[in-house]
Image: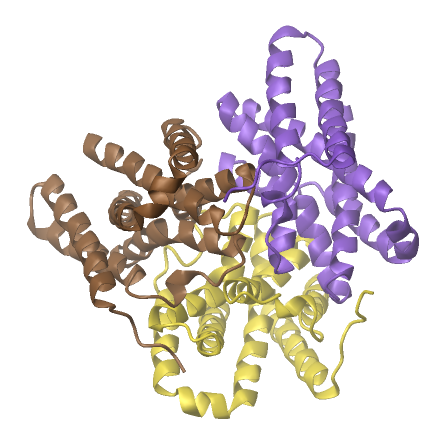
Chain colours: A brown, B yellow, C purple
Amino acid sequence: MDIIYILDLIGTFAFAVSGTISGTEKKLDLFGGAVIAFVTAIGGGTLRDLLIGSRPVHWITDLNYSYAIFLAIILSYLLKASILKYKKTMFLFDAIGIGIFTIIGVQKTLSFGLMPIIAIMMGTISAVFGGVIRDILCNRIPSILRKEIYATACVIGAILFLILDCFLLNMNVTISITILTIIVIRIFAIKKGWSLPVLY
Amino acid sequence: MDIIYILDLIGTFAFAVSGTISGTEKKLDLFGGAVIAFVTAIGGGTLRDLLIGSRPVHWITDLNYSYAIFLAIILSYLLKASILKYKKTMFLFDAIGIGIFTIIGVQKTLSFGLMPIIAIMMGTISAVFGGVIRDILCNRIPSILRKEIYATACVIGAILFLILDCFLLNMNVTISITILTIIVIRIFAIKKGWSLPVLY
Amino acid sequence: MDIIYILDLIGTFAFAVSGTISGTEKKLDLFGGAVIAFVTAIGGGTLRDLLIGSRPVHWITDLNYSYAIFLAIILSYLLKASILKYKKTMFLFDAIGIGIFTIIGVQKTLSFGLMPIIAIMMGTISAVFGGVIRDILCNRIPSILRKEIYATACVIGAILFLILDCFLLNMNVTISITILTIIVIRIFAIKKGWSLPVLY
């Protein structure tokens, strides 16, 4: 539980960094950049909480999420030049973020007594929806709808979690394996240029 | 009640088909097309449930909605060529969908003890908002905001439902008449090219 | 309390007018214009209510909000020519709206026992999010993300409210001062062309 919580804050921080950087491309002002950072970091978990009926949403009663985001925004502004240089680091942060958020979303949905197939959907929504809102605000077609293996990695990781959850006793092992699986799929997808077929 | 439930699944299926087809125009990948199908099919009912405070949203605890959508996606992919040829069939499916969803939305809102004017709004939102989210995700101005008689048909059907509900005893008759009215208005609107005045 | 309620309806009315006018630029039809008016007027408060877990959202059980919006839409259609001539009046209405909505949002959030930093965010969301949805529906990058001092005025007003709330006994004085502060900051920001630095 404790490890999950720390991972959650790390994922939030990572997404907030990538959100802030994303704002710089559209010439947003300081406030606009901060908004984009926020919605990227908490958008997915917020939609999941609204859909499964968890009230109020997770970051409203625990300020650590907000602090993680503020820290990410400030660091991003200060270290912008360096961050942009290390796009690969950014990408890795994002991959870690979706891995963590998927598994946390699956777990929370199951803890509400909902069905596994819904848990897979909610895990994926937790991981990718923040990026979808970010893209809508920046007036782009959400990249996850037409780019490489992204949400697919979350779906695979979520299914693996459900399978391992039936067999393994140690939850921490299950969590670690599934998060790592998502991250590894993402890295391979980028390196190998994997993508899903496009609809004509 | 039973008939309403089956109608609801049919409406969900119809909207998922039209959503998947819509995704093909923007060159989305398989996953992107599935997401568009989902939000088109459940977006309106989800917003209605969030606004009237129905927790959790309707499709979370009843997997039949998800199954109807998955079936629609698979069939759409397999039969794409034929579906695109019969655009009139598509349009009819969509008209049936908004008819059903409007009346279901009105009923559910009334069953929460809310006022008739709110029921009219929620019926209309149930019917049209899935399409609005679809258009936002595809980076278009939602077509219902500037095209033909669409939401107007829902509003008329919802008002008719409230009136008939005061006079008729048999709910099934009321439901059938009002759903048919919405469908007929839509068909005439398209055939005759009806539209609302544009704002200058 | 009574004054706050009347102010809330005035703010709703003001935002609905600005929403309707905004719709005319995108050649929406009558229904589309009405939808834009609605989401501009109630969008911010609706998101706030969903996030803090206030069920159902505020305008669902109190029709006065809907009446204020309908009145605003009808008047906007009738007086369109005059309204467009007096853009400064429009701007003043909008400034009054965000002032009122910010403080109401802060108060409501505190009344749910949530923390001051969340209250500041929710106040700002109440004030600006309706405009964000309006811009998304009109397929624009939300103007608050890159234009002048707008949300910043809300944040300053919300912080001032929290500070005065600790020292002053009379709530009405606190409310009046903070709403006026937001309005004055907005007016100065426009007159002087204040803006936040853009991110590169």
Q: Front-most of A174 and C28? A: C28
- Pick whichever, A44 or B67, lies toward us: A44
Residue at (78%, 42%) from the top-left corner? C14
In the image: residue C137, left or right of residue A57: right
The percent coordinates of residue C159 (x first, y second) are 59, 21
Choose top left, top right, bottom left or bottom right for residue B200: bottom right
Residue C25 location, x and y as percent? Answer: 76, 61
Residue B9: % across, % down: 44, 71
Q: Is residue B172 left or right of residue B196?
A: left
Q: Looking at the image, can residue A142 be seen?
A: yes
Above or below, A52 relative to B36 = above
Quarter assignment of residue B108: bottom right
- Left or right of C192? Residue B18 is left
Q: Is residue B175 left or right of residue A192?
A: right
Compared to B129, does B73 lie above or below?
Answer: below
Q: Residue at x 70, y 51 (%)?
A: C38
Q: Position of residue C133 (x, y in %)?
A: 61, 51
The structure residue drawn at horizontal position 70% and vertical position 69%, both measured from the top left corner, is: B146
Q: Residue at x 40, y 37 (%)?
A: A76
Q: How many marks?
A: 0
Residue B111's place in the image compared with A39, above or below, is below
Q: Mark yes or no: residue A15 visible.
A: no
